[in-house]
Image (cartoon, rainbow, N blue to C red):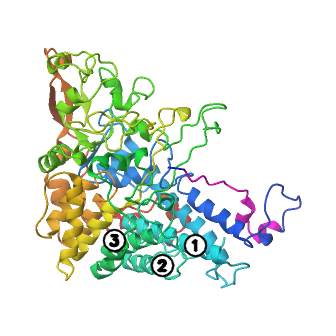
Amino acid sequence: MKKIIYSILAIAAIFATASCEKNLDIPQKGVVSEETFYQSDADAEALLTNMYVSCFGGHGIAGTEGIYNNQLMIFNYSSDDILAAGGDAEDHGDFRVFDEFRYDNANGPLNNLYSGYANSIYTANLVISNFTNENKDGAEPKFTSAFTNQCVAEARVFRAYMHLMEALAWNTPCIVDRLLLGDELPVQAENQKQVLDWVIAECEKAIASGSLPVRAGATDKDATARMTKGFAQFVAGKAAMFNNDAATARKYLGALISEGSYSLVPSQDFWKLTHAAGDGNSEVIFAPNFQEDPNFTANGWGSGTPIQRGRWMVADVLCWRTDALASTPSVCENLPGGGGGWNGGAIQQDFAKKFLEHDGDSPRRLATFLTPDEFLFEMDWSGSACNDGTMDQKKVDPKRGIANTSGVYSHEFFEWKRMVWHNIPRMIAPAPASYKGDDLSSLGPNSNTSNLCMARYAEALLLYAEACIGSSDEAKGLAALNEVQKRSGSGKISSSLTLQDVMDEKQYELWFEGCRFHDLVRWGAQGKVNLDQIFNGSGFHDRIPVSTDEFFNGGSEHKLTVNYVKAHYEKFQTGKHEYLPFPRDVKVGNPNIQDVLGWTTNN
């Protein structure tokens, strides 16, 4: 895929207020005057570029702050089918607390997540408030054109998506529908429905404008990296599902499906969906387009150090604990030094067993996680001399397996869906000659240059299938569900449309893609699942697996043995943990913001 490279222009003066300018006695250099800006297509393009860049910069939703991606980690770690893992029960503390429901409003990643959404909304409002009259004074824009109308439409959808995610996270965030001035504070929504109604209306306004880019078929890769009509339909449809409005969801998601701009990738290509080889594929509805600059070296670790900010260190976090292994698996053999992998994001073993029973050796399952025997014997190990050898040779191979006699924490099965793949495993697919892996050698081996997908077609199909249950469109909903099932390769095809089948299929298909926790909250509010039973009744936090290898513990052959330990779990509290507390710093800055549910003691 030809990457879309956005240049960042010098527009610093845009953010200065007129009241500050009159106090400046010394002319500023290298800035653009606010009075002469917002008057051309080039100015609009600069602001739109700034908006898209906000996805990666600072706390951006597709970027990295510290060693994590906040949206990816918080929403996935809160799910019931992922374990925080790490080196032990104390490791990765800032994010482990979301897995174990021990966080509070002083948590750093929580604050960073909120900041990421707020900054993206601000960058969108720079476009909207300056090229429409949607500003505090209702002032007409200095300049408009067909292109500025397109920029406004894209910014409107971008802003709507950020508000949707805020509503799913905090229930009643502020609706910031224009550029606020220095003396204004955002106003909190009265309820979640108000936010979701607004999100849907904004998407409709953007669609109705006729100015949104339209994907030119499933092979149009460039359109996957920006706000399109298809993404607007997806956001509106998803917001409607969380708004308990299935009819509106069917309207938008049905239109997205029928217009034919998206299609599921073939079954054998499922693995590509979370790797660089799949960037911009037929299934991507929106994924911010990652682009590193190999000439940029100031990464904060000293002058001249090669840049490594391809979601910096997420590659390490979401890789197995390689310092505990006999040699490095070939799939991730370029990770630097001992301890190159930090063991985060383990697949919960009860779910893995359920998935394995349902999917067997489907391409979807194989691209998601490995069984213990696959990990030991079917995967290549970079230090091994018998990757092509017999099973008898592999059983006594000293360069495979878990060499650390204390074992590997949180793993009974071995996920690799989110792992950086330096090499495509032979058990998955032959490596094409052009494949360079998910990292770029010039940027350091612990980078991850694959685009982080925010919406893909499989989720749209499953949302639509759910929206069709009990309606006159059930046959269409069943067809959407079956489309995902057939592509999975599981061989399990539903003959009728049931919520249980949709819920199960969505869990298999979208594991570790940020959907599960919010869906559980929605289904819990609708009385369709019991959140207390899911999170507390199953007791899975009392059974954290630790796998050891008998070969390195006095045995004669490789075989993984599992013991179970307890996590520092404080239990999911129904009526509290469905939503996050507002960050303490945010509440200090805006005392009007009030927490909801069980967090109200923070107010």
Q: Quadrant of the C terminus?
A: bottom left
Residue labelled with disc 2: 207
Counting from the top left corner in percent of width and height, residue 197 is at 40, 80
Nearest to the observer: residue 304 or residue 508: 508
Question: Dots 2 and 1: beta carbons under 8 Å?
Answer: no
Position above or below: 543 against 281: above
Q: Tell me which residue sits at (64%, 39%) in the image.
A: 296
Does 16 appear in magenta? yes
Mark 2 or mark 1: whose residue is earlier in sequence: 1
Asked if residue 431 can be seen in this view, the reply is yes
**Where, by quadrant of the figure, is residue 255 drawn?**
bottom left
Q: x%, y% of residue 404?
A: 27, 21
Residue 411 drawn at (x, y percent): 23, 36
Residue at mark 3 to residue at mark 2: CA–CA distance = 15 Å
Query: Does any portion of residue 180 appear in the rendered image?
Result: no
The residue identified by callout 1 is: 185
Q: Is residue 24 left or right of residue 155?
A: right
Mark 1 closeness class: few <14, some 14–19, many ≥20 residues within 10 Å: some
Mark 2: few/some/many CA within 10 Å (<14, 14-19, 20+): many
Find the magenta span and give its range. Answer: 3-21
Sequence order check, earlier mark of 1 and 3: 1
Provide the secondary structure element on which disc 2 rests.
helix
Label 1 sits on a secondary structure element that is: loop
Task: From the image, tell me which residue sits under label 3.
Answer: 257
Q: Position of residue 587 (x, y in %)?
A: 50, 64
Disc 2 marks which amino acid?
A: Ile
Q: In front of the other: label 1 or label 3?
A: 3
- The residue at the point 48 percent across, 68 percent down is 228
| Amino acid, disc 1 | Leu
**In the image shown, does 310 or 272 lie closer to the viewer?**
272
At x 62%, y 60%, the residue is 50
